[in-house]
Each structure stands twice: as C-alpha cells, then as structure tokens.
Image: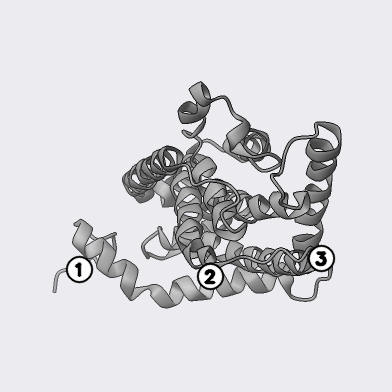
C-alpha cells in the first residue's frame, strides 16, 4: 500500500477559512483567558497599573491643558473631559500593542499546529477589553465625584467602542504581519502609540483645531472615536461633528479591510519565517 501524506493547510477559499475561524472559537476563548490570567494572576502591579496609568495621564493632561494652556472645557470638569477621551485611547493603544506582538509571542504554537491565524490577534484585542472595563469604572466614580452624570446618549457608547476595537484590529493586523517579517516593528509600535497620543484630542477638544484643518485632522481614525465618546458621555456638551465621524468611519473601514487582506496574504508563511 502506497504511503499517503496528509497535508494540513488553511482553508483554500474564503468561505472555508471563515468556517474554520468559527470552528476554532474555543481556541479564541482559551488564548484570551490565558493572557488575562498571565497578566493579572498573582500580581498586584498588573491590576494597579491599569488604574495608575490612565489616572496619572489624566492628571498631567489636566494640569498642562487646563491650568497652563487654559484651554476651554465648556462647563465640563476637565478631569472628566480628559478621562472620557482616555477610555477609547487607552483601549486602542493597549490593543494595538498587544495585537502587533501577538503572532510573534505565539510562535511556538503557530509553528506546530494549524488553526486560522486571525484568532491570535483577535484574542489579543479582546484581552485589552479588561483594562477598558476597569477604566470605565474609574470614569464612573469620577463622574459621581464631580456630579456630572451622562444622559441617554450613553446608549450609543457601544457603537464608538466597536469603532475603537475595529481601528485597533485593522492597524494591529498590519503590524502583526509586518512584525513577523521585520522584527524592527516591535520598536516602532511604542513610538506610534506615543506619537498618536499627542496628535489625538485626548487632552483637548478637537473643536480647537482650525476649521480648514478639521477634515484633514479627522484622517486620524481615533478623532471620530474620541469625539464620539465625549458626545456620548458628556451629555452632548461637545457638538457631534458628522464629517469627522464619517471620515474616521471610512478610514477604519479601509484599515480593517486592508489589514485582513494583508494578514491573510502573509499568514501562510508565518510558520516558515517565525
């Protein structure tokens, strides 16, 4: 009897691939849960850092932009104004960092068994939701202290959270795939995150950007997300700027579509390169 060789490879069609992704959903849950346990189990600083980092950033931004630069807040307590923007930004920054390193960090598993590689970056972004939920609790406490509670607009918050998730996922897929081939990208990602913090409207309102530059500024996908969070949480104190929202939504759509395309194009070589 002739020897037979079994070859395991990714689904040959998009339909098979997405079906495989659904079949391996338990692996997605396992990877996410494993990373959560590694981050928080038997540690104090792991949980504390999720609180300390956004709080310290809020304090610095409040002092610099409110006390020194004296930028307007239109009646909103400045710490609340800043923290409402810190919510989506910290989620995006954490998710982007985790996603960009996810494939390299799981090199041993990727080199040994087949599964849809998209599961790895998706699980990394999901883990960042834990820090996001902790930050939501801090903001809730802050709003109670300042007696500045949201209204019905808070019901739209899941939409803007989904946009932040998609932005991190789209950019993260590009960086995760590039990081496998070019390991220098692990040094570039922290710079991107740090630079993005200063060009995003976290410590200030995007309405201070001159009108002629507003649309160009909105090419930063997090501008529409951050403005949306503030609109949803701050009782509409900041007017909803539809052009910015639509441009950010379009950029996020392009990021996700192109990120999936590039990741799928290169993932067949991960096991060889990694």
First in sequence: mark 2 or mark 3? 2
Mark 1, residue position: 3
Q: Foreground: 126 or 205?
A: 205
Circle 1 packing at 10 Å, graded few (<14), some (14-19), many (20+), is few
Mark 3, residue position: 48
Mark 2, residue position: 31
* Residue at the farthest front position: 75
Q: Of helix, strand and loop, which one carries label 1?
A: loop
- Disc 3 to disc 1, C-alpha distance: 58 Å
Please indicate, yes or no, whether residue 154 appears anywhere in the rendered image: yes
Foreground mark, 2 or 1, reads 2
Foreground mark, 2 or 3, reads 3
Residue beneath the point at 32% across and 75% down: 23
**Colour scheme of this structure image?**
one colour
The image position of residue 210, as x and y in percent, is 57, 24
The image position of residue 104, as x and y in percent, is 55, 51
Q: Of helix, strand and loop, which one carries label 3?
A: helix
């Amino acid at each position: 009897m002739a020897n037979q060789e079994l070859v395991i490879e990714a689904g040959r069609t998009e339909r098979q691939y997405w079906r495989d992704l659904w079949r391996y959903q338990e692996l997605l849950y396992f990877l996410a849960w494993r990373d959560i346990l590694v981050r928080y189990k038997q540690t104090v600083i792991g949980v504390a850092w999720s609180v300390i980092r956004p709080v310290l950033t809020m304090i610095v931004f409040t002092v610099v932009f409110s006390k020194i630069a004296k930028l307007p807040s239109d009646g909103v307590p400045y710490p609340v104004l800043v923290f409402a923007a810190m919510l989506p930004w910290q989620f995006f920054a954490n998710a982007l960092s985790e996603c960009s390193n996810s494939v390299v960090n799981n090199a041993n598993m990727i080199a040994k068994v087949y599964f849809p590689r998209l599961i790895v970056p998706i699980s990394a972004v999901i883990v960042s939701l834990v820090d996001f939920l902790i930050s939501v609790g801090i903001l809730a406490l802050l709003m109670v202290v300042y007696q500045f509670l949201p209204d019905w607009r808070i019901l739209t918050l899941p939409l803007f959270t989904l946009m932040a998730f998609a932005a991190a996922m789209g950019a993260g897929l590009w960086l995760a795939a590039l990081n496998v081939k070019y390991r220098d990208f692990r040094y570039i990602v922290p710079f991107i995150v740090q630079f993005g913090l200063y060009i995003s409207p976290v410590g200030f309102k995007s309405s201070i950007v001159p009108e002629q530059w507003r649309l160009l500024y909105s090419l930063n996908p997090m501008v529409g997300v951050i403005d949306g969070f503030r609109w949803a949480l701050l009782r509409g104190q900041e007017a909803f700027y539809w052009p910015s929202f639509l441009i950010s939504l379009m950029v996020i759509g392009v990021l996700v579509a192109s990120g999936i395309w590039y990741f799928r194009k290169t993932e067949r070589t991960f096991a060889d390169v990694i």
